[in-house]
Image: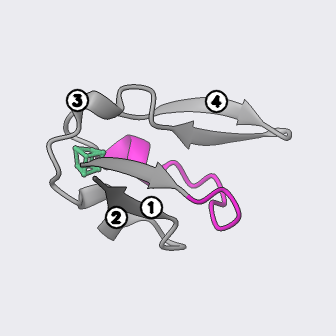
Amino acid sequence: MYPVINYEKCTGSLACYEVCPADVFEPEEMEGKKKAVAARADDCIECEQCVDACPTKAIELVA
Ligand code: SF4
């Protein structure tokens, strides 16, 4: 499993970047705003902390 971010919902809080224990996310400039990208998706340990932390429920883990 790895995280997929819905950028329609993402507001760039970077909560996932801050909470992830496996350092999966990196902030990246996107339309003038920094948003997280799953730069190291293969490192995901499926803890779902990013899913819970996201204020707009923009992340889901997919197989
Ligand atoms: S599920 Fe856990 S390890 Fe995987 S990206 Fe989210 S916070 Fe990181």
Under circle 1, the secondary element is: strand
Please name the residue shown 66% across and 56% down the image. 7
Please name the residue shown 59% across and 60% down the image. 6
* Circle number at residue 43: 3
17 magenta-colored: yes
Of circles 1 and 4, the one toward us is: 1
In this image, 47 relative to 5: left or right?
left
Q: Which residue is mark 4?
A: 28
37 magenta-colored: no
- For disc 1, the neighbor class at 10 Å (few under 14, some 14 to 19, many from 20) is many
The mark that comes first in sequence, 1 or 3, is 3
Q: Amino acid at mark 3?
A: Asp
Q: Amino acid at mark 4?
A: Glu
Q: Amino acid at mark 1?
A: Ile
The residue range painted magenta reads 6-19
Most extreme residue toward the right, as rendered?
32
Under circle 3, the secondary element is: helix
**Residue sitting nearer the eye, 28 or 59:** 59
Q: Which residue is mark 2?
A: 51
Under circle 4, the secondary element is: strand
The mark that comes first in sequence, 3 or 2, is 3
The mark that comes first in sequence, 4 or 3, is 4
Disc 2 residue: CB within 8 Å of ligand 1: yes
* Circle number at residue 59: 1
Please name the residue shown 15% across and 54% down the image. 47
Query: Does the CB distance between marks 2 and 1 fall below 8 Å?
Result: yes
Disc 1 residue: CB within 8 Å of ligand 1: yes
Of circles 3 and 2, the one toward us is: 3
Give the Cα separation between the discs numbered 3 and 2.
Answer: 16 Å
